[in-house]
Image: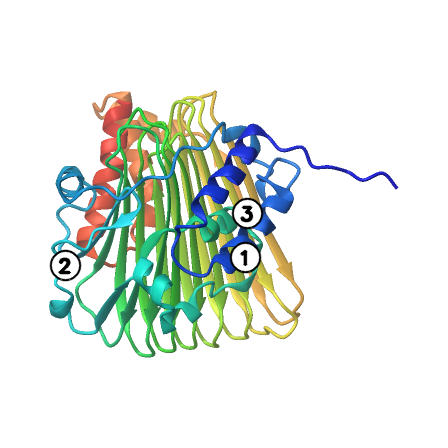
């Protein structure tokens, strides 16, 4: 039998060369990095024949490999953070990253809010910290090529441990200072002890005009009787190719409330891998996407009800203008032993122009017989009768459209419990609509 040789693209060849150059100085276990990259390299960048990437062909969309960013100077980092605007009015514990590197300046580690511990990931990797055993909490996320690339190149990040009820939100601020295209690979691990509660804010910003390539992973390990609120905002620059992953393991009698809001990036793919690891838990996972021009935004979700008696709700709202492309792929997995599972998934898209495209692919994979699961997807335009009603009362068409779009997206945003964060997200929607008008 003839041997089939996989032909590498120039981008894949560049990734191999980048890893060969970087593996000697990246912190941590070289062997585990090499294993992750070998798994990736075996198949290369995912393309449209890979079912999970059918609508987001990274082999086609990723034209080159940007050089990995070096750690910025204290002056550069401070200037970048002062210029960042996302969630600037929200009172929170700031955990900043600039050009993919943790900025510890200004953080008094001995004066953190009670119940919060922070360990820089680069130090933890170099010393073999005990908390590293909790990395990769969702086993099947390791099969994902985007996750594998992060595992191969991750250079910095933090590990955060939360005990008790922490009232002050923790704000993970990812800011790119470089005006030239750079790549980053950060990893954040949040360990939430039994009975603890915390709000995690996550924002991503970079300048326009540079084809940055961030690949960030946030991992949450929520113990029993926990309450985790997670709010993410993608405000990347207009030429960025942004890849991101949220991996969550949920204990018993726990509640997870997560939302991802996308307004930036030329191309983005946000992946959520959630696994119920204890009974009687609930998860609300939402998404809001606002894209225009020729943007491409992919929201991919996999929720595994690995135990019985759990409830999940997924609500994703997408607004598309210009010639932009939206993608939603969602799957709820219920193995045979996970009886009494309750899972509901909904994706709704609003097309504001004739040139926009939306791909919806909700799925249920159910092997149990005593469950309540459903999924749905809609795609349409603004209601002409509602538009006429508002315009008949003196509103210009653009303002009438904006009111309807705000109401449409607000159904997903209203689940955010932190009032200041919710107001910031609403302001982001209003800003996007104002720019459109």
On the rendered structure, is 153 left or right of 210?
right
Q: Is residue 395 above or below residue 346?
A: above
* Spatial separation of the CA atoms under disc 1 and disc 3: 8 Å
Residue beneath disc 2: 107
Counting residues from the N terminus, which is met first, the one under dot 2 or under dot 3?
A: 2
Count the labels in the image: 3
Task: Tell me the number on the disc at residue 118.
Answer: none
Residue beneath disc 3: 145
Q: State the colouring used for the structure image.
A: rainbow
* Spatial separation of the CA atoms under disc 1 and disc 2: 32 Å
Instruction: Name the image quarter holding the N terminus.
Output: top right
Image position, residue 342 (x, y; %):
52, 66
On the rendered structure, is 81 left or right of 284?
left
Image position, residue 424 (x, y; %):
20, 45
* Spatial separation of the CA atoms under disc 2 and disc 3: 34 Å
Query: Which element carries disc 2, helix, strand or loop?
Result: loop
Nearest the camera: 389 or 167? 167
Which residue is depicted at the point 64% across and 44% down?
Answer: 43
- Residue 144 shows up from this direction: yes
Residue farthest to the front, as pictured = 24
Which residue is depicted at the point 45% across and 33% down?
Answer: 65
Query: Label 3 neighbourhood size at 10 Å, few (<14), some (14-19), many (20+)?
Result: some
Query: Which element carries disc 3, helix, strand or loop?
Result: helix
Query: Label 2 neighbourhood size at 10 Å, few (<14), some (14-19), many (20+)?
Result: some
On the rendered structure, is 372 left or right of 324?
right
Image position, residue 430 (x, y; %):
23, 35
Image position, residue 298 (x, y; %):
47, 39
Task: Tell me the number on the disc at residue 142.
Answer: 1
Query: Label 1 neighbourhood size at 10 Å, few (<14), some (14-19), many (20+)?
Result: some
């Amino acid at each position: 039998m003839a041997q089939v040789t996989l032909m590498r693209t120039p981008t894949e060849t560049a990734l191999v060369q980048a890893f060969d150059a970087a593996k000697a100085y990246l912190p941590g276990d070289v062997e585990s990095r090499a294993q992750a990259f070998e798994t990736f390299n075996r198949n290369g960048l995912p393309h449209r024949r890979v079912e999970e990437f059918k609508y987001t062909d990274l082999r086609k969309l990723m034209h080159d490999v940007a050089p990995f960013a070096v750690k910025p100077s204290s002056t550069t980092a401070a200037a970048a953070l002062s210029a960042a605007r996302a969630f600037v009015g929200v009172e929170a514990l700031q955990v900043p990253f600039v050009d993919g590197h943790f900025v510890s300046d200004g953080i008094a580690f001995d004066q953190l809010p009670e119940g919060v511990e922070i360990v820089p990931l680069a130090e933890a990797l170099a010393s073999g910290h005990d908390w590293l055993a909790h990395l990769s909490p969702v086993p099947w996320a390791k099969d994902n090529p985007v996750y594998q690339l992060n595992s191969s190149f991750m250079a910095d990040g933090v590990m955060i441990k939360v005990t008790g009820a922490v009232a002050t939100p923790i704000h993970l601020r990812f800011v790119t200072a470089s005006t030239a295209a750079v790549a980053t690979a950060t990893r954040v691990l949040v360990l939430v002890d039994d009975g603890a509660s915390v709000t995690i804010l996550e924002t991503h910003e970079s300048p326009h005009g540079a084809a940055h390539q961030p690949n960030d992973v946030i991992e949450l390990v929520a113990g029993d009787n926990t309450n985790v609120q997670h709010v993410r905002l993608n405000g990347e620059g207009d030429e960025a190719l942004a890849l991101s992953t949220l991996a969550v393991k949920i204990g018993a009698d726990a509640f997870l409330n997560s939302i991802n809001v996308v307004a930036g990036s030329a191309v983005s793919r946000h992946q959520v891998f959630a696994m119920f690891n204890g009974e009687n838990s609930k998860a609300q996972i939402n998404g809001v996407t606002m894209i225009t021009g020729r943007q491409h935004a992919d929201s991919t979700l996999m929720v595994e009800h690995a135990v019985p008696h759990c409830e999940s709700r997924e609500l994703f709202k997408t607004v598309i203008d210009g010639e932009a492309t939206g993608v939603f792929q969602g799957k709820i997995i219920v193995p045979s032993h996970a009886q009494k599972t309750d899972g509901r998934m909904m994706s709704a898209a609003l097309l504001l122009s004739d040139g926009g495209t939306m791909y919806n692919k909700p799925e249920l994979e159910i092997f149990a017989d005593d469950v309540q699961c459903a999924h749905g997807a809609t795609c349409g335009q603004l209601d002409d009768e509602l538009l006429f009603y508002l315009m008949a009362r003196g509103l210009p068409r653009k303002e009438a459209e904006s009111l309807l779009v705000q109401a449409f997206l607000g159904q997903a945003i209203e689940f955010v419990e932190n009032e200041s964060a919710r107001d910031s997200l609403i302001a982001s929607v209003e800003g996007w609509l104002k720019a459109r008008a």
